[in-house]
Image (cartoon, helix red, strand yellow):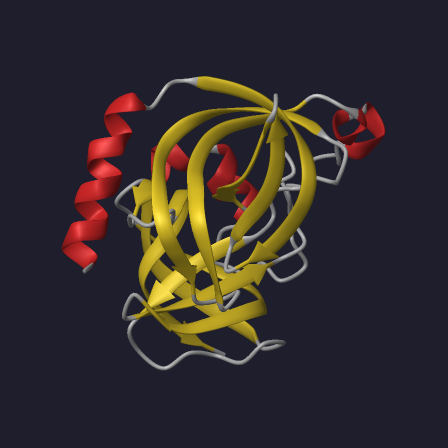
Amino acid sequence: MKKIALSLILGLSLYAGTVHQAKVQETLNSGGYTYMKVKDGNNIYWIAMTQRNTKVGDTIKYDEQGWMKNFHSKTLNRTFDNILFAGEVTTQTQAQKLQDIKPNIMSSKYQTKGTITIAELFKNRDAYVGKVVTVRAKVTKVSEQIMKLNWIHVEDGSRFSNMDDLVFTSSNAVPKVGDIVYAKGTVVKDKDFGYGYFYPLIIQKASFSK
């Protein structure tokens, strides 16, 4: 079933690039993704994107990455009859007013010698690709055994271009939400796991210590 689904996504991705503009009618955040019910002309359907701040009533632009039928989201425990995995969303309404754009914060109260801030990683991600880095941060979310991996979200109070949540993946034991940890792993950018799991920056083969 996985191979069939992946083939479907790859086949449909040949049509990627078609740009849509639609109005958000419903939005759900789960598992690092935002699911949005949109009205595109006379058509109403669901799209999925990496998690972002959108509100009901926003007008957004996005391009097609691939359609999928009967897609089941484990984190939502919901099956979508037909869903579009989309990219390059641009909010065009009040969600992008200047007051909604948070200032960058490059420092972190959690940082110690030998660690790097989340803001620094997002700002200079190209320079860190393939390198092993350590971040000291607070665990904000843990999702276990999704695609045989544990997904750990951490924040350290730093922020760059509104990006302040960093995801680590691990096949080993995971910390608890609320723990302050040293999170160590290998930097990967533009990682596509398939099935809508795309990350512009993610840390893999992670380990954690206090």
> Which residue is drawn at the image coordinates 74% and 26% (left, top)?
96
- Residue 142, placed above or below residue 196: below
* Residue nearer the viewer, 140 or 13: 13
Residue ranking furthest to the front: 42
- Residue 91, placed above or below residue 35: above
Residue 114 in sight in this render: no
- Residue 169 picture quarter: bottom left
* Residue nearer the viewer, 205 or 100: 100
**Horizontal side of residue 45 vs 144, given as left or right:** right
* Residue nearer the viewer, 144 or 63: 63
- Residue 118, placed above or below residue 123: below
Q: Could you say where residue 12 lies in the image, as x and y percent from the top left? A: 26, 32
Q: Could you say where residue 135 lies in the image, as x and y percent from the top left? A: 48, 59
> Which residue is drawn at the image coordinates 50% and 53% (left, top)?
166
> Which residue is drawn at the image coordinates 50% and 79% (left, top)?
210
Quadrant where the N terminus sits is bottom left
- Residue 184 picture quarter: bottom left
Q: Could you say where residue 131 lies in the image, as x and y percent from the top left? A: 29, 47
- Residue 79, placed above or below residue 34: below
**Horizontal side of residue 111 vs 91, given as left or right:** left
Q: Could you say where residue 199 lies in the image, as x and y percent from the top left? A: 40, 44
> Which residue is drawn at the image coordinates 33% and 24% (left, top)?
16
- Total numbered badges shown on the rendered structure: 0
Residue 202 in sight in this render: yes
- Residue 205 picture quarter: bottom left
